Amino acid sequence: MKLALALRLTFIAATFALAGPALADDATAASTATTAAAATTDTSAAPAATDSSTAAAPASSPTDIVAAPPAKSDPDAVVATVNGDPITQLDLAVAEPTLHDALAQVPADQQYTELLKAVIGIRLMAKAASDAGLDKTKENANLIKFTQDRTLRYLYLQDKMTAITDDAVKAAYDAEVAKFVPQDEIHVEHILVATEQDAKDIIGQLDKGASFEDLAKSKSSDSSAQGGGDLGWIGKGQTVQAFEDAAFALDIGKYTETPVQSQFGWHVIKLLEKRKSAPPALADRQDDIRSQLQQQLYVDLTNKLFAAAKVVVIQQPGATPPAADTTTATPPAATTTTAPAQ
């Protein structure tokens, strides 16, 4: 997380260094940023509702804000004050992912000032809401607490997910490969026609030396016709049974001497090559493996917390009793959403 934060601070210091010295009254840029909803990658880290409090303030703000992009990455550097309350580079770094989509709609040389305006606007509105006592009502207090709980849950999971390193993914991949059992694969061509007689006529032409590929191009109704009927490499279970049985029974270079019927029509099949399947490359598996490891870690962590907690579910009048003891119930399934770096 520290590395991600450092990179984000560098992004603010370097990329936003293009911004001008003052916040111009650009109505178009401001309205774009204002109307864009704030979006987070991990919806579990923020309230489900989105509102204009997360958008940039309008350019017609009466306060003359001077935006000076930071020259270096210093999380404690104060970039502005609001009624004496400091806003630091760290505040901007934390806010940037939430406002990223809105900022992307603003010209690059205005993004820093729009980000700063958005954070200032959020700070001012939050203070106004607090002064109005909106955080004291029962419903709002519960919403704030729930939002805080979800954010802490996200931070906890993010911290634990650092255990899933590239080495861990590679180890899981190696374990898969160790269990991999090569399967028979064949490279085949085929010609698909409507009737058995059509298929017999094609076999007769092949017996006289006609080109299989040419016949496929001129006679086959399958989408593979333009490629000479080439279906590429297939394994067992990838085609209908009748086709599979006939194709795998052929010798290399041979074609079926009698038509093969399936629900698609009548086939003439030719076997080109045979081989044993190879395990998928790490590059093709690493994303799925990482996701599986994340889901398993989520389940393990949740089960551990459930087991250590004393959970008592109060049965409500008229409610249907649970089918199982809820104190040992299986926790909710893991989310596969990748959270933004913090």
Image (cartoon, rainbow, N blue to C red):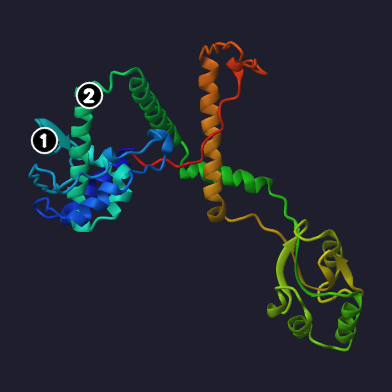
Query: Does residue 9 appear in this view?
Result: yes
Q: In which quarter of the image is residue 152?
A: top left
**Foreground pick, 99 / 272:** 99
Q: Mark 2 points at which residue?
A: 130
How many other residues sit within 10 Å of disc 1, few (<14), some (14-19) or many (≥20)?
few
Q: Which amino acid does label 2 sit on?
A: Ser
Q: Which mark is residue 90?
A: none
Q: Which of the two discs, 2 and 1, sits closer to the camera? A: 2
* Quarter of the view holding residue 136: top left
Relative to residue 196, is residue 184 depicted above or below?
A: above
Residue 224 lies, in percent from the top left, at 71, 74
Mark 2 and mark 1 lie on one chain; the one further toward the N terminus is 1
Residue in the picture at 53% in, 22% down: 304
Q: Mark 1 points at which residue?
A: 81
Asked whether residue 90 appears in the rendered view, the answer is: no
Whether residues under marks 2 and 1 lie with C-beta atoms below 8 angstroms apart, the answer is: no
Image location of residue 270, percent across then percent down = 81, 74
Give the image location of residue 319, x and y in percent: 61, 15
Q: Please, what is the three-letter code of the amino acid marked with disc 1? A: Thr
| Helix, strand or loop under label 2 | helix
Q: Position of residue 326 (x, y in %)?
A: 60, 17
Q: With respect to residue 340, does 16 lie above or below?
A: below
In this picture, residue 118 sits left or right of residue 287? left
- How many dots with numbers? 2
Q: Against 279, is 319 above or below?
A: above
Q: Residue at x 58, y 56 (%)?
A: 281
C-alpha distance separating marks 2 and 1: 18 Å
The image quadrant that residue 17 belongs to is: bottom left
Q: In which quarter of the image is the C terminus?
A: top left
